[in-house]
Image (cartoon, grey):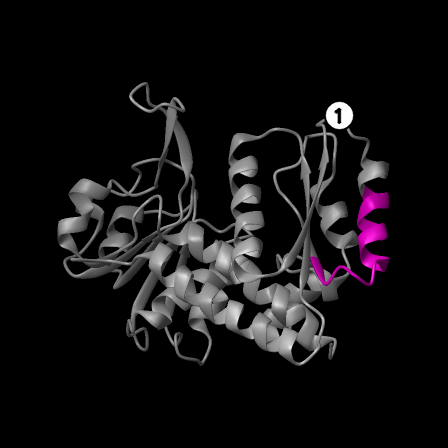
Amino acid sequence: MQLLDGRSTSEQIRKELAEAVQQRKKDGKKIPHLAAILVGNDGGSLTYVAAKVKACEQIGFESTLIRYDDSVPEEILLAKVQSLNEDKSIDGFIVQLPLPKHIDELKITQAIDPMKDVDGFHPVNLGKMILNLPGFLPATPAGIVELIRRNQIKTEGKKCVIIGRSNIVGTPLSIMLGRNADPGNCTVTLAHSKTKNLHEICQSADILIAAIGQPDFVTAEMVKDRAVVIDVGTTRIEDATRARGWRLKGDVKFDEVAPKCSFITPVPGGVGPMTIASLMINTLKAMELKGK
């Protein structure tokens, strides 16, 4: 069994991006500027946004964090999105999800300029992804594909089962791994809550990706020997032994599944750092697509 170490892989990507920033400085070009809007005090969102700001600092990007409390009216948030769309100093920005229930997430996402949508959630960018046109790939699926590529995992002709069909992870990842590319050329099954015989389907997978947000859902009997297992789950569970009172738990029952695998991602330290690395890649690409 070999760990798919997202931390070390993402560190390598950050070094590459930092070198690109230094070259831009030498050439007198603009330095990428990423902005993030954070609404409320959701623990997971706070953690991810802090990690994104730290990544910008390490790479040499400029960053701006805009915060609102969870009672912010939708129209105020929409106005800020429009302001960032028009701000030429901002190359890309994200609105951290989830948002409070009184705010329509789809409306906010659609209001973002597709050329600044470095999260890759706008319908225009999702459409470009399907057609394999230049644009911004959703950060988590792109990070998973990059983790596979950099660890030289063969995907061609392999059977891939993805548990979870969200627009953020499962659905775009199924398209990316099914396309004629490397990594890619998988035969993909996109499983979900209505899938029958899920255990048997998972047992047939050469590559099993869990993205449903249910801790310890994938057990050893669901995984065939030498499978590649990628755990996207990051659920906070109470843990009195930790100073912060909680820890992250993945969708895969790691201790019993890991011995059966050829490769497996840890939680934390697997997919999460790769998501942030992909966001940084998209931020640099935002400038390149505009010819800056």
Instruction: Give the x, y percent position of residue 266.
Output: 29, 48
**Residue range (magenta):** 78-92
Whether residue 119 is visible:
yes
Under mark 1, the amino acid is Ser
User: Residue at image x 33%, y 23%?
Assistant: 239
SS state under label 1:
loop
Q: Between residue 36 and residue 74, name the one nearer to us.
A: 36
Q: Determine whether, in the image, residue 110 is placed left or right of residue 240.
A: right
Q: Is residue 191 left or right of residue 21?
A: left
Percent x, y of residue 292: 73, 76
Q: Residue at x 40, y 43 (%)?
A: 233
Q: Nearer the viewer, residue 81 or 198?
A: 81
Dot 1 alpha-carbon crowd within 10 angstroms: few under 14, some 14 to 19, many 20 or more: few
Vertical side of 179 occupied by 2: above or below: above
Residue 279: give x, y in percent of width and height.
Answer: 56, 59
Residue hosting label 1:
71
